[in-house]
Amino acid sequence: MNSRERYLAVMNFEPADHVPLWEFGYWIGAVRRWYREGLPGREGATGDLADGDIARGEALWWNEEKPPELDIHAYFRHDPGMRHVMLNNFFTPKFVPEILEDHDESVIARDEWGMVESRRKDKSTLAHFIRGPVQSREDWERLKSERLRPALDGRLPADWERLKAEYRTRDYPLALGGSQGFFGSARRLLGEVPVLMAFHDQPELIRDIMNSLADFWCILYDQVLNQIDVDLALIWEDMCYKTAPLISPAHFREFMLGPYRKLTGVLRDHGIKVILTDTDGNFWKLIPLFLEAGVTGLYPFEVAAGMDVVAVREAFPKLQMLGGIDKRALAAGREAIDAELNAKVPRLLRQGGFIPHVDHAVPPDVSWGNFRYYRERLNAMILSA
């Protein structure tokens, strides 16, 4: 089986020669450590990337991979990763990134999505939000008309015709979407605290943002899917904290369920059977709503936030799951790694619909020896299942 056939079989709970050998991603600080500790650098090094940047693993590949990913990928002989249709599915034109203030160890900058943040130059901590591009209803109406027009002009790569020909003979899973979602995009527009306040103070603004995004993506994706077929769709939310979602299930039902159903309906009409949502944190209370909304799978199941993939599988037997391996076990050593893998992997591999990998990017406190032991043990489990 090739990587595409393997992925689709696993996601459909069907037999496969083995589950895809994929990893989620790695902090650049971890990769730098691994080079020092023995990771061969056949494809290059980390260059000028900051320690807090993320190198994508196979579960997150795009069309152009960064060198550290390829070194790790080659070392473990992993399967070809997921690739994404290179479609800009948010602002066109994007904002021009700019440094507004330059301090010794940090900058205040505007990114391509119009967010103004204070961030450390080494990206060792999360950025501190200052303001989003939407401060008023007028801002939102202007952004809709100027940067969220559902036309393909300026949204596809220059080599689109070549890519369409490549996609027809692909041996890897091809994904549409990602990077944006309903809550996730609203948070980028307003900011983390302002978006939560807006659910109470400006519900009609939130309602319009989410309904408008659904209409925008339905029209945009329909045009792309009339030209190519894809294997899965991705929606990015990151709408949960360590103990619970950032909004209530009632708010999800009121504001997000309808837009989700509209979008997933269009995707299903184009034959897409795998629709995955990426959200960190504890999303236990939202799983039934995601399923009702047409989502078929979730990731990355952060263990520190209470997401136990064994318990989730018992509660939701047909939910597709990716991730779920506690990154903290990798730092703790071989005994902890064995316990983590033994408790989850054999059982879930037998049940299907599961691709095991770390529950988010591997941090710098994981040594190369520990990571190598973890990944070799996991690969052996997968290949012998």
Image (tube, grey):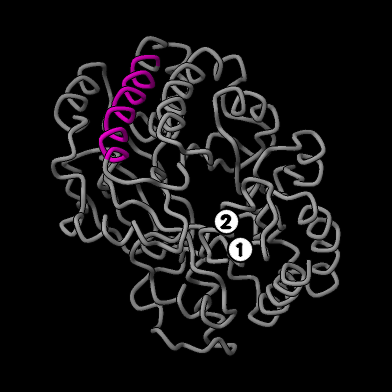
Q: Number of callouts in the render?
A: 2
Q: Tell me which residue sits at (52%, 12%) in the image.
A: 254
Front one among 32 and 293: 293
- Would you name the residue on which mark 2 appears? 7
- Would you name the residue on which mark 1 appears? 20
Q: Quadrant of residue 78?
A: bottom right
Q: Residue 74, percent across and down?
A: 51, 81
Dot 1 falls on a residue whose secondary structure is loop
Residue 256 lies in the magenta stretch = no
Asked whether disc 1 touches disc 2, contact meaning CB atoms under 8 Å apart, the reply is: yes
Q: Tell me which residue sits at (37%, 35%) in the image.
A: 188
Q: Residue 255, percent across and down?
A: 48, 16
Magenta stretch in the rendered image: 207-226
On the rendered structure, is 83 left or right of 133?
right
Q: Residues within 10 Å of mark 1 (few under 14, many from 20)?
A: many
On the rendered structure, is 3 left or right of 353?
left
Q: Residue 130, percent across and down?
A: 35, 38
Q: Name the image quarter holding the N terminus.
A: bottom right
